[in-house]
Image: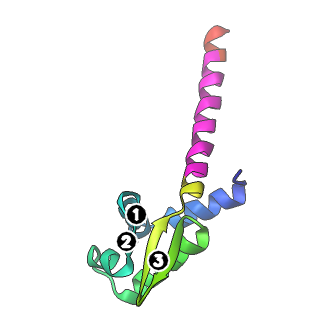
Amino acid sequence: MHNNKDIILYFKALADETRLAIIEMLSRENLCACHILEEFEITQPTLSYHMKILVESGLVDSERDGNWIRYSLNDDIIKGVGNKFLSLENKNLIKKNRKMEE
């Protein structure tokens, strides 16, 4: 279960257009930094900064592969965040149904 501090950390990590785009790319496939860098007009140090934030938040996992680092989504955390919002959606639907019954 993710507490509110975890959720805040995830959203801070996602509150950047580049990082959100990286998450979308990683949802399709695991990628090395060189392939991620090809998609953006940023420098390698800037990409490293973004990846550090994503990895430290826990949303993204990294693994060294020779000279490269391969990145992937942390499925458990992604599912947990999704489940948190499904739970909120369900609570909201129940609330709306109760109001309609009144």
Give the residue type at disc 2: Leu
Give whichever of 20, 74 is nearer the camera.
74
Name the foreground residue: 66 vs 84: 66
Between residue 25 and residue 14, name the one nearer to us: 25
Look at 55% across and 46% down and name the residue there: 82
Label 1 to label 2, Cα distance in Å?
7 Å
Q: Quadrant of residue 24?
A: bottom left
Q: State the separation of the CA atoms marked 3 and 1.
A: 14 Å
Distance, label 3 to label 2, CA atoms, is 14 Å
Residue type, numbered disc 3: His
- Decide if residue 48 is on the left or right side of residue 3: left
Indicate which disc residue 83 carries. none
Amino acid type indicated by mark 1: Leu
Instruction: Choose top left, top right, bottom left or bottom right for residue 12.
Output: bottom right
State which mark lies toward you, 3 or 1. Answer: 1
**First reached walking from the N terminus: tag 3 or tag 2:** 2
Q: Camera-side residue: 53 or 28? A: 28
- Label pair 3/1, CB-CB below 8 angstroms: no
Which mark, residue 26?
1
Q: Which mark is residue 50?
A: 3
Residue 52 screen position, x and y as percent:
53, 79
* Magenta part of the chain: 79-97
Q: Residues within 10 Å of mark 2 (few under 14, many from 20)?
A: some
Q: Residue 13, position in %: x, y?
A: 54, 67
Tell me: residue 63, above or below residue 14.
Answer: below
